[in-house]
Amino acid sequence: EIVLTQSPGTLSLSPGEGATLSCRASQSVTGNYLAWYQQKLGQAPRLLIYGASTRASGIPDRFSGSGSGTDFSLTISRLEPEDFGVYYCQQRGGSPTYTFGQGTRLEIK
Amino acid sequence: QVRLVQSGAEVKTPGASVKVSCKASGYTFTGYYLHWVRQAPGQGLEWMALINTNDGSTDYAPSFQGRVTTTRDTAISTAYMDLSSLRSDDTAVYYCAREYSTSTTWYKAFDFWGQGTLVTVSS
């Protein structure tokens, strides 16, 4: 089973600052099938990035993804108030077939 | 527009079963896989199952093998998730989610989600 470990657990930042979230896999992620989601309280997750670095439809260009193999990151260049929430990475490969990281909470400082 | 609309909240007793539905609209139902993901209160996301809506083939997370079944009815563009032998730690919001794909590539990510169905297991 591929385990995804996200860091930090919580990130406290102010609007306008930049943020970098990390996702490390216990084994290499097949085909770079690594995605990032944002979830706000009481809402379903929203797809931000797929294929490690491709923004989903309608996602602002301040969001960018990078990485390959076992190390991936999500960068938000200039935080807007609506960016605060919980972020999850997710991969497809191994067994179970799809797994999520435990999440990084991005909160307003 | 793409929509996934799930059935309403359920309250079940331990040992019972629950069936959650997910009705799709705004796209060709059989053109995309549907997945089931759950989230316990205050916890993260846990993948459970997928169904190939075209041929009905399925895949399940090992931790749910034998307890979860997903099916579909293509005539009404609806997928279902059955979870049996419910325990208190099955209390969670259950989501259906569509797997993003184009005509040539499956991206293994979930681009549209249902609103979630809260299943509470309590005696």
Image (spheres, coloured by chain):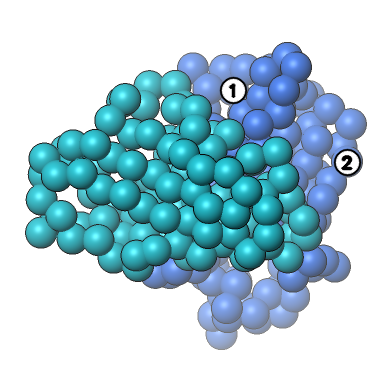
Chain colours: A cyan, B blue
Q: Which residue has dot 1 on it?
A: B25
Q: Chain of mark 1?
A: B
The quarter of the picture where residue B119 lies is: bottom right
Q: Is residue B9 above or below residue A67?
A: below
Residue lying at 67% horizontally and 18% vertically, measured from the top left? B102
Residue B88 lies, in percent from the top left, at: 58, 80
**Which numbered disc, 1 or 2, marks the residue that appears first in the sequence?**
1
- Residue at the far top: name it: B103
Q: Is residue A61 above or below residue B70?
A: above
Q: What's under tag 1, amino acid-wise?
A: Ser
The quarter of the picture where residue B121 lies is: bottom right
Q: Which residue has dot 2 on it?
A: B57
Side of A85 relative to A44 (left or right):
left
Q: Disc 1 vs disc 2: Cβ atoms closer than 8 Å? A: no
Question: Considering depth in this image, is B8 or B50 the residue closer to the camera?
Answer: B50
Residue density around tag 2, few if under 14, some if 14–19, many if 20 or more, within 10 Å: few
Residue B46 lies, in percent from the top left, at: 59, 61
The quarter of the picture where residue B104 lies is: top right
